[in-house]
Image: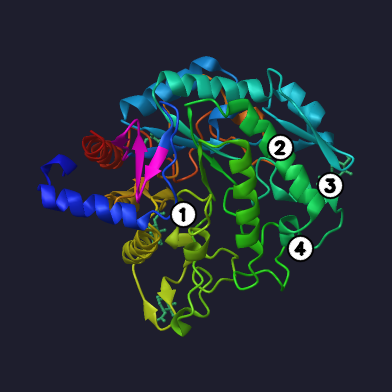
Amino acid sequence: MKLELLIPVAGFLFSFLTFAQSAHVKRTVPKGFVTTRGAEFELDGKPFSFVGANSYWLPLLTSTQDVEATFQQMHDAGIKVLRTWGFNAINGSELAGALQSGLTYYQVWNNGDWTLNDGPQGLQRLDNVLNIALKYDIKVILAFTNNWVGYGGLELYIDHISPGASTHDVFYTDPKMIASYQRYVKTIVNRYKNSPAVFAWEMMNEARCLGDLPSSAACSAASGTLPTWYKENSDFIRSLDPHHLITTGGEGHFFWKNPAFASDYNFNGQAGENFDFDLTLPNIDFATYHMYPQTWYPQLDFPGSNFSVEGWGLFWIDAHANAAKKAGKPLILEEFGVTGVDNKTSIYPSWVGRALDTKHGIMPWQFGALGLKEDGGNRLIKYADALIDGASPNDGYAIYKNQTAIWNIFTNAAKVQAARSL
Ligand SMILES: *[C@@H]1O[C@H](CO)[C@@H](O)[C@H](O)[C@H]1NC(C)=O
Ligand SMILES: *[C@@H]1O[C@H](CO)[C@@H](O)[C@H](O)[C@H]1NC(C)=O
Ligand SMILES: *[C@@H]1O[C@H](CO)[C@@H](O)[C@H](O)[C@H]1NC(C)=O
Ligand SMILES: CC(=O)N[C@H]1CO[C@H](CO)[C@@H](O)[C@@H]1O
């Protein structure tokens, strides 16, 4: 439903509520920059509702033709936002292999510190992705690092700065690691801070107390370790860039006191996030969360009750929609998926329907491009999950146009969102 259709009284009430809910003054941003207005995104003065895509592999492509072809396919599907990695880091010991295989890398770690690669095999590939995104009218969310080892995440910072450290969460409190991370953030933000191709900065993909190393006993939502890191670093990013949106990139773990959820990792604060609190931080502009109930609940049960993948997903969507509404900020279901063509076909319509009904931006994991020329298979490295099965990897979640029923769920959703953005 378009807003213009609301009767004036409802329109007045709506603006009043929006005003009352937004605690901070609305930012004035340059033309073409996405911003927020209460619980909605806004672009050039109009609501901006969208279906987006995840593609971590786009900056790894060596062929500009393939990057262009991927954006063309996204554009044809009605996609308005892309989420990709703004990092690709390797250990010095991997450099020779990377040079030989053409692997994209922006940071090389040696002797406890990293050096930047802003050359043709480095940040120029990310420049290229952003330039082509602009041409296809697609805005890009860039994450600065990874909670996981893939593409050179936290474990590289930890291994190099504090060799032998036994816990993952040392990253959030060690001043040298924070400074090293911020040096990288500053490099990326300064490079693109005037670009309308950037939708938002994302502090980390899926920050948790644990990663490929375990969590220390001290780290949890109760200790505030990760929320404090979110606060410090969102403030830091804002000090560099007054205009672009900033978000966590988190999975949306709650810290609920309800004893029924005391042993549930998604709700008991053990993961480190505190979704409701994190969203109140002044420089977190909108919320993100992820959703993989099949792998999170292999037994498909809460303590005391069984549920369906579809049903749990609806519950998770509603819980985040309610929290975001309370905070008066927009939210994105920025990664989600189930495996199996039949599962996707039967479950996605209700998840997507509920997310659209509750004013989400949605970004399924992950985009599948067909017909790319390049074979990505030879660029497998230690810090990669591997670029497998050709340039656009089929990890069991990827959605390709040849899967017509699934594809249409998202292209139809894109049309609904576009009609709301007028
Ligand atoms: C990085 O390379 C150095 C030197 O080759 C090696 O000693 C170290 O174990 C490597 N670190 C990781 C995390 O692979
Ligand atoms: C479909 O989902 C069910 C429930 O999670 C799972 O057991 C099954 O393996 C899935 N099918 C495929 C092909 O992945
Ligand atoms: C669609 O294309 C992908 C990628 O090439 C392939 O893995 C899949 O088998 C194709 N067909 C269907 C029905 O998914
Ligand atoms: C609490 C409960 O009933 N859990 C069950 C849910 O279903 C799985 C698979 O059938 C069982 O293994 C659980 O015990």
Q: Reading the chain from its start, which is encountered first: label 2 or label 4?
A: 4
Instruction: Residue at 64%, 60% (x, y): give it.
Output: 228
Instruction: Residue at 74%, 26% (x, y): give it.
Output: 117
**24 is higher (above) or lower (below) than 141:** below
Mark 2 vs mark 4, foreground winner is 2
Who is closer to the viewer here, 359 or 194?
194
Q: Reading the chain from its start, which is encountered first: label 1 or label 2?
A: 2
Q: Is residue 357 left or right of residue 26?
A: left
The quarter in which the N terminus is drawn is top left
Helix, strand or loop at label 4? It is loop
Instruction: Residue at 58%, 22% (x, y): give it.
Output: 127
Question: Which region shows up in magenta?
Answer: 35-49
- Cα gap from disc 1 to disc 4, whole angstroms: 24 Å
Disc 4: which residue: 167
Helix, strand or loop at label 3? It is helix
From the Cβ of disc 3, is ligand 1 less than 8 Å away?
yes
Q: Is residue 48 magenta?
A: yes
Please name the amino acid that badge 2 sits on. Tyr
- Cα gap from disc 3 to disc 1, whole angstroms: 29 Å
- Residue 195 percent location from the top left of the image: 52, 25
Disc 2: which residue: 184
Who is closer to the viewer here, 48 or 109?
48
- Cα gap from disc 3 to disc 4, whole angstroms: 14 Å
